[in-house]
Image (tube, rainbow, N blue to C red):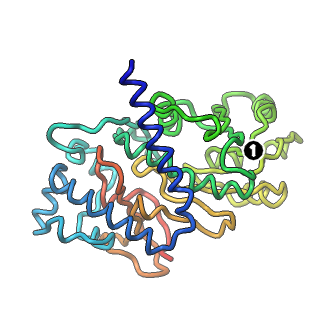
């Protein structure tokens, strides 16, 4: 029991310390973030060479060693992988030998509909939680504060978000002054009127959920003459929100809409700032590039596959991973 309490306090202190640092990151210069990215890149490459079978073999076949990787651009020398390659033998992407990292195995069907099991070590999960303070500082433009506001999450029971939230509740002790007042509601579980009543009763400052569902919710409410008490911001992720629905929420109703970019493989990848003119990528934690069909980095203005490399998770190492999305390189 004592060790359990000690562990909760230790991880809580770790998370709060990193959250304090995260509050400064949105205003750091890009070069500082790149230096942090490069340090993390070199550490995980060294780890992959020593402990992860897939990357050790891939580097040996190509005549490469850890010293050949200095920046994220060097990741192009590794093979591009995807969910099928990972799913065919997940153990090859996990560290061999003793000392398996503690953490959480996430289950997700993603956009493919196929169940995927992917393990994150505890440290990467708590870093992701601290990382959320970057977005909180953006939302403070609308909520008026970084902590203490009310957040309602419209997510499925058993979703990746709920799995991670359960892990945090089991392993952390968070001071009330540093936390939010949260509630969860399964989308579509209640009739529309009852769901809107639950939302209005909770009075969220921030309403979060899947983009398509939140858009459909506000559209259905408008069509049926029902009123959703306006939150100070709507935040969506997991999928896209149709432009007509976003216009309804943001223009007609005057509620700011913020999109986030996350995945089971890398957790927090990016989020929109208060100007909502594009995504701020978390380059210090996730290396992102746009690549053509052959895996080569696309030129400016060209479209291609989104390739990510998670630089913080040592329980399942995924470098040069084709996530399944398509974008245009800026």
Horizontally, residue 32 falls left or right of residue 89, namely right
Q: Residue at x 13, y 57 (%)?
A: 57
Horizontally, residue 175 falls left or right of residue 244, namely left
Q: Is residue 321 above or below residue 8?
A: below
Q: Is residue 30 above or below residue 139?
A: below
Q: Is residue 210 above or below residue 289?
A: above
Q: Position of residue 297 (x, y in %)?
A: 36, 75
Q: Quadrant of residue 247?
A: bottom right
Q: Looking at this view, is 83 or 128 the one in front?
A: 128
Give SS at disc 1: loop
To which residue does mark 1 refer? 205
Q: Looking at this view, is 322 or 310 the one in front?
A: 310
Q: Looking at this view, is 281 or 144 the one in front?
A: 144
Q: Quadrant of residue 153?
A: top right
Q: Residue furthest top?
A: 1
Label 1 Cα crowd, 10 Å radius (few <14 / some 14-19 / many 20+):
many
Q: Residue furthest bottom?
A: 300
Q: Residue furthest right?
A: 225
Work out which quarter of the rendered image holds the N terminus and state it: top left
């Amino acid at each position: 029991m004592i060790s359990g309490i000690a562990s909760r306090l230790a991880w809580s202190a770790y998370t709060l310390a990193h959250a304090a640092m995260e509050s400064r990151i949105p205003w750091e210069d890009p070069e500082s973030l790149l230096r942090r990215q490069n340090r993390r890149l070199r550490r995980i490459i060294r780890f992959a060479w020593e402990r992860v079978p897939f990357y050790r073999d891939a580097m040996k076949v190509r005549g490469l060693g850890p010293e050949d990787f200095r920046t994220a651009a060097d990741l192009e020398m590794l093979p591009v992988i995807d969910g099928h390659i990972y799913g065919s033998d997940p153990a090859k992407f996990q560290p061999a030998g003793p000392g398996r990292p503690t953490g959480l195995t996430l289950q997700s069907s993603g956009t493919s509909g196929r169940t995927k099991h992917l393990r994150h070590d505890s440290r990467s999960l708590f870093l992701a939680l601290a990382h959320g303070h970057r977005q909180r500082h953006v939302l403070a433009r609308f909520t008026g504060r970084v902590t203490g506001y009310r957040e309602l999450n419209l997510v499925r029971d058993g979703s990746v978000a709920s799995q991670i939230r359960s892990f945090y509740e089991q392993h952390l002790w968070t001071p009330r002054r540093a936390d939010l007042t949260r509630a969860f509601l399964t989308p579509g579980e209640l009739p529309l009127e009852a769901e809107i009543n639950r939302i209005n009763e909770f009075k969220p400052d921030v309403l979060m959920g899947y983009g398509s569902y939140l858009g459909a919710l506000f559209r259905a409410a408008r069509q049926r003459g029902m009123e959703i008490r306006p939150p100070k911001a709507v935040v969506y992720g997991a999928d896209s929100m149709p432009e007509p629905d976003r216009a309804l929420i943001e223009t007609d109703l005057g509620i700011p809409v913020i999109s986030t970019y996350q995945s089971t493989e890398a957790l927090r990848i990016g989020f929109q700032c208060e100007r909502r003119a594009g995504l701020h990528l978390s380059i210090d934690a996730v290396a992102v590039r746009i690549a053509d069909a052959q895996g080569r980095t696309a030129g400016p203005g060209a479209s291609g596959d989104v390739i990510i490399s998670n630089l913080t998770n040592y329980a399942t190492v995924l470098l040069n991973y084709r996530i399944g999305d398509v974008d245009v390189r800026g």
